[in-house]
Image (tube, rainbow, N blue to C red):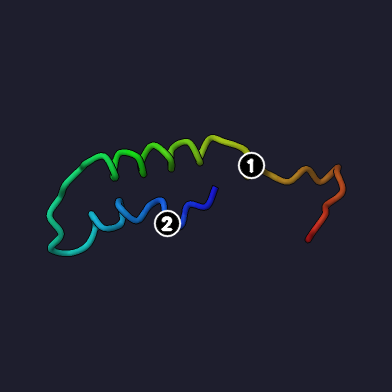
């Protein structure tokens, strides 16, 4: 999942002079971002006992 565009409705709320409105687009963006934080692939600490593969 690419989070770049998903957060746009939330970023818009932080603009100076922007009227605060929490609607369906903002709720969906918030829900998708929360799911992305707890869904694989989740970054973790490296296991130095295993081989590293860099692409």
Residue drawn at point x = 57 percent, y = 36 percent: 39
Q: Is residue 22 left or right of residue 9?
A: left
Up/down of 46 relative to 11, above or below: above
Q: Which residue is denoted by mark 2 in the rendering? A: 5
Q: Is residue 40 left or right of residue 5?
A: right
Q: Give the farthest residue toward the front.
A: 24
Residue drawn at point x = 61 percent, y = 41 percent: 42
Tell me the distance, in whole angstroms, between the alpha carbons under discs 1 and 2.
19 Å
Residue 48 x/y as whole percent: 81, 46
Q: Nearer the viewer, mark 1 or mark 2?
A: 2
Q: Are marks 1 and 2 in contact (CB under 8 Å)?
A: no
Residue 49 x/y as whole percent: 86, 42
Q: Earlier in the sequence, mark 1 or mark 2?
A: 2
Dot 2, crowdedness within 10 Å: few (<14), some or many (≥20)?
few
Q: Which labelled disc corresponds to residue 41?
A: 1
Dot 1, crowdedness within 10 Å: few (<14), some or many (≥20)?
few
Up/down of 23 relative to 18, above or below: above
């Amino acid at each position: 999942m690419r989070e770049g565009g998903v957060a746009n409705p939330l970023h818009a709320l932080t603009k100076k002079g922007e009227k605060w409105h929490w609607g369906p687009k903002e709720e969906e963006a918030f829900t998708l971002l929360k799911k992305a934080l707890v869904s694989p692939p989740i970054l973790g600490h490296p296991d130095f006992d295993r081989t590293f593969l860099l692409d």
